[in-house]
Amino acid sequence: MNTRDLRQRLGYTQEQMARACNVSVSTIRAWDQGARNPSGAALRLLQTLNAPPQGRKNREPRQNMPTVATVAGVKVMIFYNDHAPPHVHLSKGDMDVVVPIASPGLPSWAFTRGERREVLRWMKERSTALLAAWDRARAGESPGGVE
């Protein structure tokens, strides 16, 4: 696994990745340079972060997930106190897809082509506002709306 590419795709500095993986910055540096390889829980976390967004049927209760916007009929939601990396949940009908804010992408089976195109365009144009909403939700505050 190329941790430097993953880290850069997620928009993380070495310091941010070290905090997310609960390792030292020197460990991240060694992974980036290929001098060492991640293992154990850190490896599993990196594999999860590197996996494509996954769709799933409604398994999570929605009452604690504020909707920050609706784009092309797709709800854009953020959980309070959710795990890193910063991401949104896109939901329509019984489909729920988790998409990283720093590198948005959607699998071809998620929503219609037009919905995917519109939602991705919207996310890219509003990434700064989405990250601010993510930070507010992580702090236990209302993320507010994203126009």
Image (tube, rainbow, N blue to C red):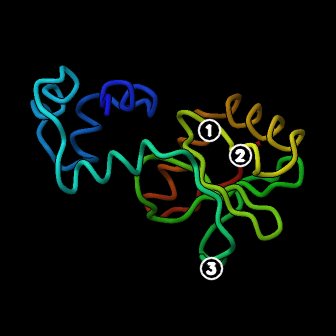
Between tags 2 and 3, which lies in front?
3
Q: Measuring from the top left, give residue 80's x and y in whole percent.
A: 51, 65
Q: CA distance from mark 1 to mark 2?
A: 6 Å
Q: Which residue is tagged 2?
A: 146
Q: Is residue 70 above or below residue 17?
A: below
Which three-letter amino acid code belongs to the residue tagged 3? Pro
Q: Which mark is residue 129?
A: 1
Residue 86 lies left or right of residue 7; in this view the side is right
Give the quadrant of the C terminus: top right
Mark 3 residue element: loop
Secondary structure category for the residue under label 2: loop
As drawn, the label of residue 61 is 3
**Position of residue 52 measured from the top left corner of the image (x, y, whole percent):** 54, 45
- Of mark 2 and mark 3, the one earlier in the sequence is 3
Q: Are marks 1 and 2 in contact (CB under 8 Å)?
A: yes
**What's the distance in space between the residues labelled 1 and 3, CA to CA?**
25 Å
